[in-house]
Amino acid sequence: MIIWLTLFLLLIIAESLIGNFTALTISLGAIVGATAAFFHIPLMFQIILFTIVSGGSVTFLRSELQKRFTPAITHFAGESLINEKAIVIEKIYKNKKGRIKVGGEIWFAESVSDIEEGEKVIILEINVNGMRVIPEKDLLK
């Protein structure tokens, strides 16, 4: 019984570090194993119960726990700026960053061509480095 309770505690600690509900669901099997040991059920049956309960809880319970307790992925606000117009406030050199202003905010931006200060651009992509833009006049061609 001590072994099952130790396994349970180790799984709970692992779950607190991992946080994906796998160790938590397996720990249910350890509790069932400890309960079986308390009632002096033979070790082979304890292991079988542990395996069945752990496997079943990982298979059926884990996905439900993830749905209920994992926050939905939210898109970051900047994604709404894709395809929006912006104004270059610091010249953008080919493959080097300049700055643009869009929606009252200033962002770093890069392009595959030189873009002069004051030109209007269209935002194509947002990544960790800033925005990738294209001159508005190039879209009109």
Image (tube, rainbow, N blue to C red):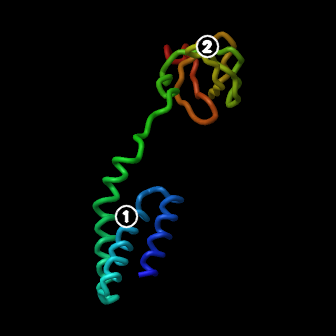
**What amino acid is found at the position of numbered circle 2 in the picture?**
Ile
* 48 to the left or right of 112: left
From the image, tell me which residue sits under label 1. Answer: 25
Tell me the residue at 43%/40% (across/down): 73
Three-letter residue code for mark 1? Thr
Secondary element under disc 2, as helix, strand or loop, is: strand
Q: Position of residue 20 (x, y in %)?
A: 44, 56
Q: In the rendering, which numbered label is found on residue 87? A: 2
Percent x, y of residue 45:
29, 85
Which mark's residue is nearer the viewer, 1 or 2?
Answer: 1
Q: As drawn, which residue projects farthest toward the top?
A: 118
Q: Position of residue 14 (x, y in %)?
A: 51, 64
Seen from the viewer's position, the closer of residues 40 and 16 is 40
Residue at the spot 31% in from the left edge and 65% down from the top edge: 57
Where disc 1 sits, the SS reads helix
| Label 1 packing within 10 angstroms: few (<14), some (14-19), many (20+) | many
**Looking at the image, can residue 52 be seen?**
yes
